[in-house]
Image (cartoon, rainbow, N blue to C red):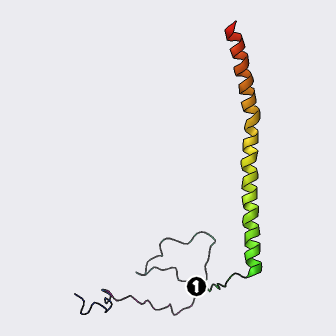
C-alpha cells in the first residue's frame, strides 16, 4: 500500500545490470558457456559496441523535398488508378455489344 497518494510507487524488481565483455572481440558463447543461440547467419559478422543515431529537425528544404516525394507518389498512384479504370472501358463496351446482339437474336 502506498504511503502517500502523491508518492510514486517503488519498482517491485531491481533491474539487472550486465557488465560489458572484457575481451572486446566477438564472443560466440552464450551466457551459460555453451554455444550462442541462435547461431549467427553464414558470412555475417557484427561488430560489438553501440551505434549512434543522430536525429535532427527537418528544415524547410527537407520538408519541401519530402512533400515533393509524397506528391509524386500520390500522382503515381492516381495514374495507376486511372489506368486501371481506362482498361475496363473496352471490356464494358464489348459486354454491351454482346448484350445488344443477344437481345436482338432473342426477339427473333
The magenta stretch spans residue 81: no
User: Percent position (x, y) of residue 3?
Assistant: 24, 93
Secondary structure mostly seen in the magenta stretch: loop
Q: Give the residue drawn at x 49%, y 70%.
A: 38
Quarter of the N terminus within the rendering: bottom left
Horizontal side of residue 72 vs 8, given as left or right: right
Which span is picked out in magenta?
13-26
Q: Nearer the viewer, residue 107 or 36?
A: 107
Quarter of the C terminus within the rendering: top right
- 44 lies above or below 14: above
Q: Badge 1: few (under 14), some or many (20 or more) residues near its Cα, within 10 Å?
A: few
Horizontal side of residue 76 vs 31, given as left or right: right
Q: Nearer the viewer, residue 94 or 30?
A: 94
Q: Give the residue drawn at x 71%, y 26%.
A: 95
Q: Give the residue drawn at x 73%, y 76%.
A: 63
Residue that sits furthest to the left in the current view: 1
Q: Nearer the viewer, residue 86 or 48?
A: 86
Q: Which residue is mark 1?
A: 48
- 86 lies above or below 43: above
Q: Secondary structure at mark 1?
A: loop
Query: Which of the 4 image quadrants contains residue 72?
Result: bottom right
User: Percent position (x, y) of residue 59?
Assistant: 73, 82
The magenta stretch spans residue 16: yes
Q: Nearer the viewer, residue 47 or 50?
A: 50
User: Percent position (x, y) of residue 70?
Assistant: 72, 65
User: Percent position (x, y) of residue 21?
Assistant: 50, 90
Count of number-bearing discs: 1
Q: Give the residue drawn at x 73%, y 61%.
A: 73
Amino acid at each position: 500500500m502506498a504511503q502517500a497518494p502523491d508518492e510514486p510507487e517503488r519498482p517491485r524488481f531491481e533491474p539487472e545490470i550486465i557488465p560489458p565483455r572484457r575481451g572486446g572481440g566477438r564472443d560466440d558463447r552464450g551466457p551459460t558457456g555453451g554455444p550462442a543461440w541462435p547461431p549467427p547467419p553464414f558470412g555475417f559478422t557484427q561488430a560489438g559496441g553501440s551505434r549512434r543515431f543522430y536525429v535532427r529537425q527537418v528544415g524547410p528544404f527537407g520538408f519541401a523535398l519530402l512533400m515533393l516525394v509524397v506528391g509524386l507518389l500520390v500522382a503515381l498512384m492516381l495514374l495507376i488508378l486511372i489506368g486501371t479504370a481506362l482498361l475496363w472501358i473496352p471490356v464494358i463496351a464489348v459486354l454491351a455489344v454482346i448484350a445488344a446482339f443477344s437481345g436482338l437474336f432473342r426477339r427473333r
